Amino acid sequence: MIGRLLGLSLVAAIAMAMGVQPASAASCESLASTALTSGKITSSSIVAAGSFTPPGGMGFAMGRPGTPGPFKRLPAFCRVAATLTPTPDSDIKIEVWMPAQNWNGKLVGIGNGVWAGTIGYSAMAGPLAQGYATVATNTGHAGSGMDAGWAVDHREKLIDFGYRAIHEMTVNAKLLLAAYYGQKEKTALWFSCSTGGRQGLMEAYRYPEDYNGISAMAPANPMVGLMIGSLYTGYVAMQDPAHRLSRQNLMAVHKAFIAQCDQKDGLKDGIVADPQDCAFDPSVLQCKGQPGDDCLTATQLATVHDIYIGPRNPKTGAQIFSGFEPGSELQFGMLTMGTQPFPVATSYFRDLIFNNPKWDFKSYNYDKDLAASYRDDGSILDVPSDGLAKFFSEGGKLLLSHGWSDGLIPAPNTIAFYKAMTATMPPKEKDDSVRLFMIPGMGHCGGGDAPTVTNMLSVINDWVETGNAPNRVIATNSPRQKPESRLLCPYPQYGQYKGAGNPDDASSFTCKAQ
């Protein structure tokens, strides 16, 4: 009998090594009786290939509506939904999707956008189609990701959002994998952007054993600082009519930036490889006569300057949070137009900090109100740059990335986190454990005026599997665009044109130190 069991174990091990999934240890339907660490399973059933329809007919990826298209390509999978209740006030919805056949032995955790409130169905579809099991959560509440009102007088729900829900989701997903496949996962990977990027950093900080590799794009961390920065960006443009910037003003600034900085990477193609390698001066747009859309007044130029600089303490001059990089003008207009700053930030201060439905964003004092802004929530929402030592010491890999033209989360913020995190790391540990790739022309989590499509899941997977840290990443256009690729390099390097070769092909570029 012992020999037979050893033989079966050997067969399973060989099958896994070949990427072949052994037969399930349990039927999908029988998982409904699986005991979870906290909470219960609410449904468990097989979804036929290409038949999944998200609740309400829509999926959500990083807080944005998705389309049914990605689901048509999905294989058959076991879909498990559960509600986790680690505290009496918790109501954490999770879903675990497991390929019915050809599981690659790996789990991918999917994060959220802004204040969460939804499960990222369309973000789950990509990894599942590649053979991964995947898991996601609404972090403990349902509703719009733009509103933090759900956390008023519900500290446990804020803790669920801040860090507990992702950990509970991950632990219980691993239980379900073991029950369904009869074996534990060989690798667990995190793959997400924005709030999802912050969640990945939080996992590495608080629960370093949960994931072997983490891809965190444009992480919204420190979140409290980001809320202050978003509020400030809106304030400087909305404080009075003279400071307001029209869409045409922002387009003019962006055009001037491209004209001044485009050729710094050796190629005039409308793409600025490294904005920090070009000292852009928007004052070239100052109006000589009557103000217009194609020129800016001195007051408007001061607004642009303040947005680039970011919030500072008015008494000490100390930087509170990073400003936006030149090139992000077309997107940070989302924070500067209208009558109120970005609702994600105004809700944070109105509902959680001041608990005052009539609170006026112009009343915020960037000196006196700072302590209150951090006091109750900083330890729940923020990841310190020196907090990932255990994750790295246990072999964890961290892949950071950020679009230079991000107009919702400033790209320099991720660079600052990276620099602070690696400043005291031994060189070999740094080289083995962490990479940062900055993506020219890319906005928040994607899109922009350059090749911005990357496969960071494959990058972090290959790094964890082989131990070889990535020294190159290729960005491409989407299939509906002109075929074009661009070389991405580990920060502080950037891709520079070699001077010859097809300018639309990444092979014509080389990595250059800043």
Image (tube, rainbow, N blue to C red):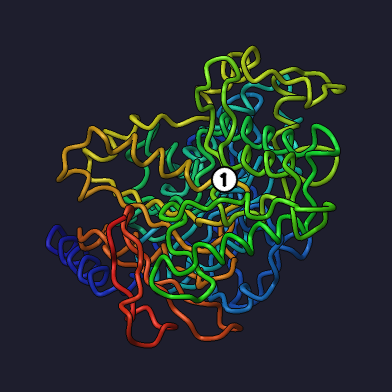
- Name the spot of residue 142 as percent of width and height, x first: 73, 42
Q: Dot 1 corresponds to which residue?
A: 324
The number of callouts visible is 1
Residue appearing at x 47%, y 51% in the figure = 279
Is 70 or 24 nearer to us in this picture?
A: 70
Residue appearing at x 65%, y 54% in the figure = 329
- Name the spot of residue 93 as percent of width and height, x first: 63, 44
- Name the spot of residue 423 as percent of width and height, x first: 26, 35
- Name the spot of residue 469 as percent of width and height, x first: 24, 58
Disc 1 packing (10 Å; few <14; some 14–19; many ≥20): many
Q: As displayed, is residue 123 above or below residue 219?
A: below
Q: Secondary structure at mark 1?
A: loop
In the rendered image, which quarter contains the N terminus?
A: bottom left
Q: As displayed, is residue 278 above or below residue 238?
A: below
Farthest residue in the front direction? Answer: 288
Is 306 or 283 nearer to us in this picture?
A: 283
